Image (cartoon, rainbow, N blue to C red):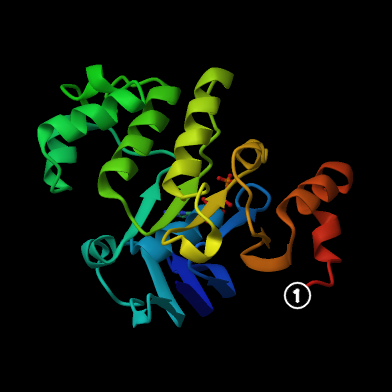
Amino acid sequence: MLDISDLHVSVDSTEVLHDINLHIGQGETHVLMGPNGSGKSTLLKAVMGFGGYAITAGSIVFKGKDITDAPIHERAHLGIGLMFQHPPAISGLKLGKLLTATSTLGGGAIEALAQSVNMEHFLDRDINVGFSGGEIKRSEVLQLKVQQPDFIMLDEPESGVDLENMNLMGKEIAGLLEKDVHIVNRHRSGLIITHTGYILDYLEADQGHVLINGEIRCHGNPREILRVVKEKGYGECLRCKQM
Ligand SMILES: Nc1ncnc2c1ncn2[C@@H]1O[C@H](COP(=O)(O)OP(=O)(O)OP(=O)(O)O)[C@@H](O)[C@H]1O
């Protein structure tokens, strides 16, 4: 579904990502780990096509189409969706209005989806204005449920979420990634950034990658990587031979 080859990305003329190669097949969920500031969010934003994240070399191919230079709305139309780590607050734009504008669903269907993540009372509020950390995350999940992207990128879905809401979020994200469907029949794929790995309690991820200083330094079983990092730190990933 997604093929990233030899990708270099610069922010403010500083190269943040160096020579990234990543292949995510249809139905697969991959996990991206790595120390703070290693470039994980930058990779997701570059795949989504945000301005300010200049691709200076390499390519991104999605569903067989080269999207390296495609604008963000084209990528969204093709089926790429992103849950932000820190989404912006937008004064003057109601959450319900955004949801109606980004889907073909009617008001009743949107209301029902909002209820499923306890957000029915937020449709009339300006997006993220005064939302708590957990409410922001539920709003992001709701937006993904409405958009139904085929490739879902999640930037730290656990951060700021209480245990009860983590349960809700985990199940919703597993639903979005069709975890109850056999992998050969799954249409959706995902890439999830996690520090804690809590999300892995709700869905099995197929592959984990460790990004350090803008380079992918290790691949492997996500739970195994987490175990090693907890015990020995990310330094151990620099010695990883699974490249
Ligand atoms: N707009 C920007 N201007 C300058 N530097 C930036 C910008 N965006 C990202 N960077 C830098 O790029 C590096 C990678 O940032 P990024 O947010 O991708 O890291 P991360 O791995 O997601 O970190 P964390 O785990 O802390 O969320 C950091 O050093 C960051 O300061």
SS for dot 1: loop
What is the x, y in percent for residue 47? 41, 65
Q: Residue at x 82, y 42 (%)?
A: 230
Q: Residue at x 45, y 53 (%)?
A: 153
**How many numbered tags mark residues here?**
1
Asked whether the viewer can see residue 190, the reply is yes
Q: Residues within 10 Å of mark 1 (few under 14, many from 20)?
A: few
What is the x, y in percent for residue 125? 19, 22
113 sits to left or right of 105 = right
Q: Residue at x 54, y 26 (%)?
A: 167
Up-down relation of residue 18 to residue 228 (above or below): below
Q: Considering depth in this image, is 186 or 11 the residue closer to the camera? A: 186
Up-down relation of residue 221 to residue 60 (above or below): above
* Residue topped by disc 1: 243
136 sits to left or right of 9 = left
What is the x, y in percent for residue 168? 48, 27
Up-down relation of residue 171 to residue 130 (above or below): below
Point out the image quarter for the C terminus: bottom right
Asked whether the viewer can see residue 95, the reply is no
Amino acid type, residue under disc 1 in the picture: Met
